[in-house]
Amino acid sequence: MLIQLPDTIKDLYFVGDVHAGWNIVTYYIRQYKIKDSVFIFCGDVGIGFESLMHYANCVVPQLHKTLKKFNDIFIWVRGNHDDPSYFEQRLIDTKYVKCVSDYDIINVCNLNVLCIGGGISIDRQFRMQNDSVSIVRYMKYHNCDYQTAKLSCLKSYWPDEPVIYRPKVEEHIDIICSHSAPSFCYPNDKGGIVKDFAAYDSELLNDIDNERAVLDRVYEDYKNEVTHWYYGHFHKNQMQTINNTMFKLLNIGEIVRHYSDNNNTL
């Protein structure tokens, strides 16, 4: 789906994982008086850990106070710590705050930004166990059956979290914004904490390889047109140019203004 932003939007920013810390960004907007801009979040927005009513009645109206004042827009791309249904169904879709689906295209400032969500949770086994415990507790407290409890409990893990591949779109793509990244981008190994979690999850390393292989295919589709690729997920700050494409990994809460030839981090 092509999403055309208003002509009043004159500037483009990308944001690293905020894990429900949206106020980090609204603070920067107020602090630096950033107006007429769109902020595209590279996943792990933190959506799905509360009810839809909570977001509709509390979170979004609070964000609107700042965004409306400065004529700014938040675009949320799904990460592995987001409920995919919010993005697939666009459950949050207001003038100033939007959840976008995988492979939606944002047209802004004469640029097309392709949004690709999803990623593997390295701690998924522990999240699934915690969710199971929550369901059992709900059953006992509410004296209900398993299915009722499962539907009623809030989750911390969603099995449909992985990145999915879709064939190349017809539109020319200038920028890709994803949560994870191709295999040849930083980080290039699976050391440290990943191997620790893999000791309890026999399929983890293979699934991570598959995730990044999907984005390798995406890169092959768009490598002759994409000039910039922004991503999060890995909680580091890194920038590298590969075959004329600048790959920018954003750290937690990092905000970067897009320029055609370089970047400025707030």
Image (cartoon, rainbow, N blue to C red):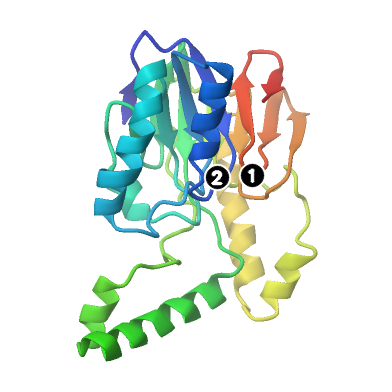
- Which is more N-terminal, label 2 or label 1? 2
Residue 71 visible in this rendered orientation of the protein: no
- The residue beneath circle 1 is 252
Secondary element at image label 2:
loop
Question: Could you tell whether 240 is left or right of 165 in the image?
Answer: right
Give the residue displayed 31% in from the left and 72% down from the top: 153
The quadrant of the picture occupied by the C terminus is top right
Question: What amino acid type should be assigned to the residue bearing mark 1?
Answer: Ile
The quadrant of the picture occupied by the N terminus is top left
| Circle 1 crowding by C-alpha within 10 Å: few under 14, some 14–19, many from 20 | some
Secondary element at image label 1:
loop
Q: Nearer the viewer, residue 25 or 47?
A: 25
Q: Position of residue 244 (x, y in %)?
A: 72, 22
- Is residue 94 placed above or below 50 in the rendered structure? above
Question: What amino acid type should be assigned to the residue bearing mark 2?
Answer: Val
Give the residue displayed 61% in from the left and 43% down from the top: 232
How far separated are the C-alphas under marks 1 and 2? Answer: 6 Å
- Is residue 220 placed above or below 120 in the rendered structure? above
| Circle 2 crowding by C-alpha within 10 Å: few under 14, some 14–19, many from 20 | many
- Is residue 239 placed above or below 71 in the rendered structure? below
Res 206 quadrant in image: bottom right
Question: Could you tell whether 55 is left or right of 82 in the image?
Answer: left
Q: Position of residue 260 (x, y in %)?
A: 64, 13
Contact between marks 1 and 2 (CB within 8 A): the answer is: yes
Give the residue displayed 75% in from the left and 49% down from the top: 187
- The residue beneath circle 2 is 18
Q: Position of residue 237 (x, y in %)?
A: 74, 39
Q: Position of residue 160 (x, y in %)?
A: 41, 61
Give the residue displayed 29% in from the left and 52% down from the top: 54
